[in-house]
Image (tube, rainbow, N blue to C red):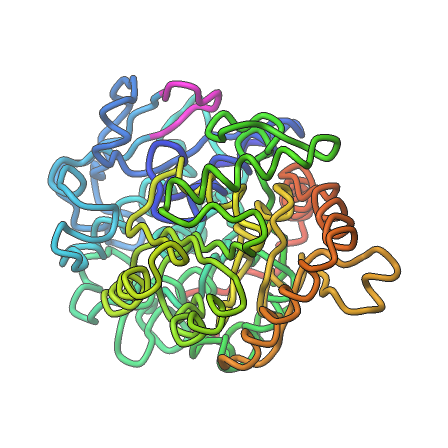
Amino acid sequence: MKVLYVCAELFPFLKTGGLADVGAGLPPALRALGCDVRILMPAFPTIARVATSTQLVSLLPDGPMPWGGAPALPATDVALATLPGLALPLYLVRSPALYERPGNPYLGPDGKEWGDNALRFAALAWAAATLGQRLDRDWVPDVIHCHDWHTGLAPAYVRAFADAGRAAPSTVFTIHNLAYQGLFPAAVFPQLGLPAACFDVDGLEFFGQVSFMKAAITYADRITTVSPTYAREILSEPQGCGLDGLLRQRANLLSGVLNGVDYQVWSPATDALLATQYDLDTLAEKSTVKRALQTELGLEQRANALVFGVVSRLTEQKGLHLLPPLLAELVQRGGQLALLGQGDAALEQAFVDAAIRYPGQVGVRIGYDEATAHAVVAGADVILVPSAFEPCGLTQLYGLRYGTLPLVRRVGGLADTVVDCTLENLDDGSATGFVFDDPGGQGLFSAMRRAFVLFRRPDEWAAVQRRGMGLRFDWLASARHYVAIYQSLRAGAKSGVRSSFRRV
């Protein structure tokens, strides 16, 4: 089974969020199950600098496509490349005009989206579709697996080839966060080179705009999300983000597959970024890591302080606007906060102000770096993920492995992975963290109070830690679900499923 994995980020080479971690974890797991996997992504500078590549072929078409169109790309080609430490082949979409610029993949140094993002990511999608048309004659994918809106046009291009009578691979599209949809003005549509019928309410038109996300949901052969609960939540408002009606129409093709964890990177037993390593049989050593975290973020060295950790984008989606008003009570109860994150400027300032207001009790580092992320996840007692919505979440899974009890809202993948410390769950040994429902601050505050109560019962606290540390959410389990999806498509389950640009 030849699988083309299409993404915009790949850890450790380029990361703005969990999408990069999925790219690092899922493809090797698919390979371990026998799939012939290759990755396709843009040649962003941080990738191109370390890649060893040879030119493969120009991405500009030699002539008109069967439907008469092709994206209006500048000089662009695809190269087969290797990256240090990456065992999988990598296709790079190379276009100096589109990708050789500062900033992250989506934003310039000024924090604003690049004005040509539609064309930048149309190039990625076009590369995926043309690889499905024997662009590389030595390797043609059976399945093109696309991730998030950046790849959303790939199923549309594949469908255009199929409608023109050409053999085309199956497409799978994974929604990582429906709130980010890749919306662009209608004026960009002629540049995309899609059939005119595609810009329609039954295509990728979304309230007068072009929606990359809607294109993928409309034309992919299978749709997945990154957790079972999120797959159910997006079938209705508010999590459907205006696409719930379309998702309900295609619900028979939608499934939730929980993300996994790369335990070679995230394991306290082998984590070289920690002051010391520990595991179930040496759990007492976690106190050394806690002291190191307190030192690093300027917190008082108190073993009896309940340290709440945050590693997150600072946005309302992550529920972190609820936390600053609760910090006075947290500190009064003897707690501390260790926060690493960046995002909304007002939230950043609120946490910086809190660190000044509560010196030694609130430690804040604005930004992101991997070493501090590991220090917080391992050194805190509780990891906070109070999200308004959360498609999957990886931070709570890291916390479980490190004996850092997750405190989460009962949404998306958080609901699928954390078991609340109710009396019943403590009694039967299933509890792994603290779960609340109320989207307001009262729900978070109540869960934090319960954490303080359990922390004063060290034997019960340790039992919950051990339960969480013993769980495994590995990528092989996720990969098995995806292989089953690929096989069902290859076996012919897609017959009659593909919608067409043509009117019936």
Q: Is residue 63 above or below residue 189?
A: above
Q: Residue at left 84%, top 55%?
A: 429
- Farthest right residue in view: 428
Q: Which is nearer the eye, 230 or 336?
A: 336
**Could you say which quadrant of the image residue 189 lies in?**
bottom left
Is residue 141 in sight in this rendering? yes
Q: Residue at left 26%, top 79%?
A: 208
State which region is magenta. 82-91
Q: Is residue 44 left or right of residue 442?
A: left
Residue 349 covered by magenta stretch: no
Q: Which is nearer the eye, 336 or 7?
A: 336
Q: Is residue 457 above or below residue 62?
A: below
Q: Position of residue 500 (x, y in %)?
A: 46, 64
Q: Residue at left 74%, top 64%?
A: 421
**Could you say which quadrant of the image residue 185 lies in?**
bottom left
Tag count in the figure?
A: 0
Q: Is residue 42 left or right of residue 313?
A: left
Q: Position of residue 361 (x, y in %)?
A: 41, 57
Q: Is residue 455 left or right of residue 440?
A: right
Q: Position of residue 219 (x, y in %)?
A: 46, 61
The majority secondary structure of the magenta stretch comes to loop
Q: Position of residue 454 (x, y in %)?
A: 70, 62
Q: Residue at left 28%, top 47%?
A: 65
